[in-house]
């Protein structure tokens, strides 16, 4: 498969904004401005010998879109440059990326340790799916460095965590946990969705593998599902590549194309959304019916020092605890008119969700309490609307709580 990319110069030296507009471009013979969408299942060969050579790996052209596709390659290369990784492989969804990062290299008899504050489906993969195939798992409080050390067994092969975590915005110290892992040859996998690749680069802090749901900020406009795994070349060659080729969680070229175009505007979108989120966090923090605002960009975030150490900004998601319980949270959400109720995030449209009854409804009440997900907690993903309009919308909703 060809991942050769025609570049005017050394794209590694470009600033991120330039990499996100030009990185990975594979211009066809027609010289198109916008990246071409190669919506094709397969590729034809000039003759039988060429087909033979491609299957032998002696000719690096494309064969079949489950193995590779030029539009998908462009998305992978653009992300690879931006993340500063050796290699990248795109897949159909964020969950396909999480699953591939684990299942492609773990085997029966191995053990994985994960921070328990994480996306519900990630918890299913680690806590239910892996054990069914003989991969043991232990869930811990990821904020506690001793808990990582104490959970290590002779067969521990991977650490998995999300930072900041959904929806409570707990952080894991990437550098400290990676240091613990390095001593035991354990791979560190970070789900970097909440921080976005704009605000946090886990590989620079010592992590081995980064996964994204591209569905979130990378598309950012609520259209397509997608995911991507970034790692060193050895991991990709030894494990990931064959797993994706042969088991087939491949991304559609169409979705990869949407993601590729999404990357072009990622910096401006995320910057504007983070600025608005910071204003809204401060605005909500002063309100009577708001018990607590958790936002990574505020000095009262419980791990504010760690935010400064490993993140370049506060992000665009905040957790707001409405004074009361489910009824109060529902009244708040139901009164919103611009901000819509949805379990998605990272979108240009502001979205609100009540984790206890949606994204985390399958987590048992005691485990929810342990995670800090109270019945009054709502998660707010701030979009690109005018802040004044969002504040006015929130004002009406706060008034409806009582
Ligand atoms: C959304 C999300 C996922 C899953 O992504 P999909 O594209 O919906 O499969 C995984 N991890 C985190 C942190 C997410 O927010």
Image: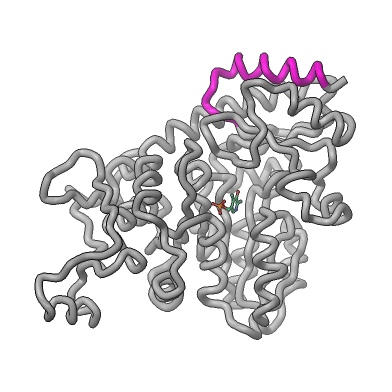
Q: Measured from the top left, where is residue 89 in percent x and y?
A: 41, 62
Q: Say whether residue 1 is left or right of residue 304.
A: left
Q: Measured from the top left, where is residue 71 in percent x and y?
A: 30, 53
Q: Residue placed at 50% from the left, 27% from the top?
A: 272
Q: Say whether residue 399 is left or right of residue 177.
A: right
- Which residues make up the magenta segment? 382-400
Q: Residue placed at 77% from the left, 59% from the top?
A: 141
Vertical side of 314 occupied by 395: above or below: above
**Residue 208 versus residue 133: which sits nearer the camera?**
133
**Residue 144 versus residue 292: which sits nearer the camera?**
292
* Quarter of the N terminus within the rendering: bottom left
Magenta stretch, main secondary structure class: helix
Q: Measured from the top left, where is residue 53 in percent x and y?
A: 17, 80
Vertical side of 59 occupied by 43: above or below: above
Q: Residue placed at 20% from the left, 39% from the top?
A: 33
Q: Quadrant of residue 248?
A: bottom left
* Quarter of the C terminus within the rendering: top right
Q: Measured from the top left, where is residue 324 in percent x and y?
A: 89, 31
């Amino acid at each position: 498969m060809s991942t050769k990319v025609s570049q005017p110069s050394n794209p590694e030296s470009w600033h991120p904004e330039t990499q996100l507009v030009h990185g990975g471009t594979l211009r066809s013979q027609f010289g198109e401005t916008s990246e071409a969408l190669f919506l094709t299942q397969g590729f034809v060969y000039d003759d039988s010998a060429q087909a033979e050579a491609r299957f032998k790996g002696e000719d690096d052209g494309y064969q079949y879109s489950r193995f590779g596709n030029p539009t998908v390659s462009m998305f992978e290369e653009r992300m690879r440059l931006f993340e500063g990784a050796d290699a990248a492989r795109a897949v159909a969804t964020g969950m396909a990326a999480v699953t591939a990062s684990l299942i492609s290299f773990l085997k029966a008899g191995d053990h994985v340790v994960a921070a328990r504050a994480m996306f519900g489906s990630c918890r299913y993969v680690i806590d239910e799916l892996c054990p069914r195939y003989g991969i043991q798992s232990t869930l811990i409080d990821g904020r506690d460095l001793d808990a990582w050390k104490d959970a290590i067994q002779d067969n521990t092969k991977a650490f998995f965590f999300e930072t900041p975590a959904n929806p409570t915005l707990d952080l894991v110290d990437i550098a400290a946990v990676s240091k613990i892992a390095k001593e035991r040859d354990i791979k560190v996998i970070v789900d970097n969705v909440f921080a976005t690749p704009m605000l946090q680069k886990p590989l620079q802090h010592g992590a081995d593998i980064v996964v994204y749901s591209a569905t979130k900020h990378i598309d950012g406009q609520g259209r397509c599902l997608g995911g991507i795994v970034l790692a060193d070349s050895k991991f990709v060659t030894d494990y990931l590549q064959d797993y994706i080729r042969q088991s087939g969680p491949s991304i559609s070229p169409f979705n990869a194309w949407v993601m590729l175009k999404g990357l072009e505007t990622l910096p401006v979108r995320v910057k504007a959304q983070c600025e608005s989120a910071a204003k809204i966090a401060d605005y909500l923090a002063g309100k009577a019916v708001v018990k607590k605002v958790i936002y990574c960009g505020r000095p009262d975030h419980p791990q504010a020092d760690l935010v400064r150490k490993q993140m370049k900004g506060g992000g665009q998601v905040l957790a707001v605890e409405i004074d009361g319980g489910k009824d109060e949270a529902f009244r708040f959400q139901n009164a919103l008119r611009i901000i819509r109720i949805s379990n998605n995030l990272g979108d240009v449209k502001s979205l609100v969700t009540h984790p206890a009854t949606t994204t985390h409804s399958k987590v048992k009440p005691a485990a929810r309490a342990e995670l800090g997900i109270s019945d009054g907690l709502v998660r707010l993903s701030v979009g690109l609307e005018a802040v004044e309009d969002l504040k006015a919308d929130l004002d009406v909703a706060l008034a409806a709580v009582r």
